[in-house]
Amino acid sequence: MKEEQMNAVGTAISVCEGCRLCRTRNNTVMGEGNVNSRILFVGEGPGQEEDKQGRPFVGPAGQLLDKMLLSIGLDRSKVYIANIVKCRPPQNRVPEEDEAEACLPFLRKQFAIIKPDIVVCLGATAARYLIDRNIRITRDRGNWYEKKGCSFIATFHPSALLRDQDKKKDAWEDMKKIREKLDGIQ
């Protein structure tokens, strides 16, 4: 049932022309993973490699995300991974507000299907749209927020960790908090 519902969302995303990002995409990137997962990871938007493959987090940042997941005993088969926007912004720029607003209904549908207990916002863009518009990733990462019966946390986007190795220690602390929270609800 959930798979069929998610497939319907994917079909709607694949024909979406709700913003200008549709004009330059190669593929839409709906998301992927376990629709029965208790945890949803949300990034900003597809990069170049994701746009080519139609899958989230498959480039260098995705390889790091896979290692981060493994560090707390998870892998892609146990989680669901999505993005705020479903089409690649040109030159991997931050999605503009109207672009994000056009895609958020799709993410909300995905959320309603998965019904996660935990949402991990990977980076500032995801945190601003899902937790609080005024959130600052460096200041507010690692804190839990309760919304609509779900626990939200923000951490650094894996691409930020690739650019700044000094942030990895903080990200590791966040991942340990995520594991602890997940263990507490199972």
Image (tube, rainbow, N blue to C red):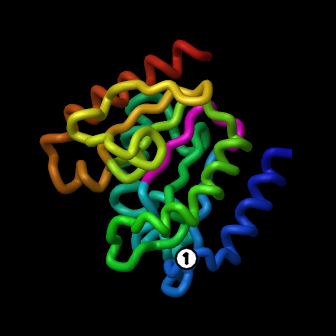
- The residue furthest left is 166
User: Where 96 sits versus 128, above or below?
Assistant: below
Residue kind at label 1, given as amino acid type: Cys
- Point out the residue furthest to the bottom here: 23
Q: Nearer the viewer, residue 83 or 96?
A: 96
Task: Farthest residue to the top: give it.
Answer: 184
Q: Which residues are magenta?
A: 35-43
**Rendered residue at 34%/71% (across/down):** 92
Viewer can see residue 55: no
Image coordinates for residue 63, horizontal then vertical, percent: 38, 54
Indicate left or right for 184 with 165 as reference.
right
Q: Secondary structure at mark 1?
A: loop
Quarter in which the N terminus is drawn: top right
Is residue 36 magenta-colored? yes
| Residue for point 60% across, 37% down | 78
Looking at the picture, tell me which residue is in the foreground, 147 or 28.
147
- Relative image position of residue 84 (x, y in whole percent): 50, 57
Q: Which residue is mark 1?
A: 19
Quadrant location of the C terminus in the rendered image = top right
Count up the numbered dots: 1
Q: Position of residue 127 (x, y in %)?
A: 40, 44
Instruction: Give 59 or 160, whichever is nearer the viewer.
Output: 160
Q: Write down the quadrant of residue 68 in the picture.
A: top left
Relative placement, left or right, of 71 versus 8 is left
Residue at (51, 36) in percent of width and height:
119
Q: Is residue 7 above or below residue 51?
A: above
